[in-house]
Amino acid sequence: PRTTAEIIAHHADFLQGDALPLVAGDFNSNAIWDRPAKRAFADTDAALTALGLSSLYHAVRGERFGEETLPTHWWQRRATQPYHIDYVYAPATWARQVTAPATA
């Protein structure tokens, strides 16, 4: 099996081309689970950043990876285990055009 970073590298020409790529989905990963010998999310983020893409959530909200205040998943539907594992990466220039929704 290939890692997400390897898949990104394989498609690098397309992702940095004129297509204005959008990479979105359930990555099942977060910086909180990275370890020095296994930096799965940091490697994925670095690969996408190198291609000129950025996480719109983090750019718009100004939050650091691993310190997200809005979870996208609750492990086994437990309110006590919220995680942010879903991401939308887009050209970094898009972040200036996206706004966070108003909170209720």
Image (cartoon, rainbow, N blue to C red):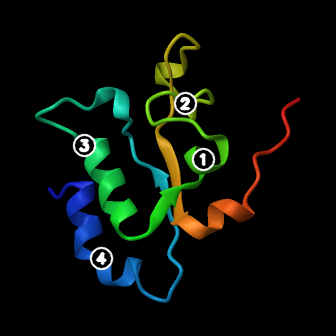
Query: Residue 34 lies in what quarter of the image?
Result: top left
Q: Residue lying farthest right?
A: 104
The Cα atoms of the two marked residues, 4 and 3, are separated by 18 Å
Mark 2 and mark 1 in contact (Cβ < 8 Å)?
Answer: yes
Q: Residue at 47% across / 20% down in the picture?
A: 76
Crowding at mark 3 (Cα within 10 Å: few <14, some 14-19, many 20+): some
Which residue position is annotated with label 1? 57
Please tell me whether mark 1 sits on a helix, a strand or a loop.
helix
Which residue position is annotated with label 4? 11
Figure check: 77 above or below 3 = above
The Cα atoms of the two marked residues, 1 and 2, are separated by 9 Å
Q: Residue lying farthest left?
A: 37
The amino acid on which the numbered mark 3 sits, given as a three-letter code, is Ala
The Cα atoms of the two marked residues, 1 and 3, are separated by 19 Å
The Cα atoms of the two marked residues, 1 and 4, are separated by 23 Å
Q: Is residue 19 left or right of residue 37?
A: right
In the rendered structure, which disc, 2 or 4, sits on the residue that comes first in sequence?
Answer: 4
